[in-house]
Image: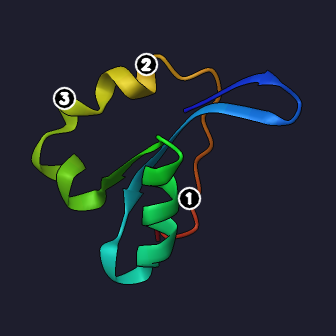
Amino acid sequence: MCSCTNSNYLATFTHLAYQRYLTSPDALATLETLGFEAYRLGQLRDNFREVEPVIREADMLSLILRPLK
């Protein structure tokens, strides 16, 4: 989810379905420091209802379908 108030400011950002072993701990720490959200793939599998409102309220959504084969 992304909400931009002007061209140089990202107000909100949510990263969905990251895999812990492929994601740098520093990147996750940066997201947390900036007040952004991140959900692991396992979290989504266990309880998709938790993230459904995040997707529904998104102004912009980007999907990377390359991993799906």
Mark 1 burial class by Cα count in 10 Å: few <14, some 14-19, many 20+: few
Disc ID at residue 49 = 3
Residue lying farthest to the left in this orientation: 46
Left or right: residue 44 compared with residue 17: left
Q: Secondary structure at mark 3?
A: helix
Q: Percent x, y for residue 15?
A: 47, 49
Is there a contact, CB below 8 Å, between mark 1 and mark 3?
A: no
Measuring 32% from the left and 74% from the top, which residue is drawn there?
20
**Of labels 1 and 3, the one closer to you:** 3
Quarter of the image where the N terminus is located: top right
In the rendered image, the vertical position of residue 66 relative to residue 7, given as above or below: below
Q: Which mark is nearer the camera, 1 or 2?
A: 2
Q: CA distance from mark 1 to mark 3?
A: 21 Å
Q: Residues within 10 Å of mark 2 (few under 14, many from 20)?
A: few
Residue 9 visible in this rendered orientation of the protein: yes
Name which quarter of the figure residue 7 lies in.
top right
- Of pointers 1 and 2, the one earlier in the residue sequence: 2
Depth check, front residue: 26 or 42: 26
Q: Considering the numbered disc 2 on the image, is that residue within a helix, a strand or a loop?
A: helix
Q: Residue at x 23, y 48 (%)?
A: 44
- Identify the residue under disc 1: 65
Give the farthest residue toward the right: 7
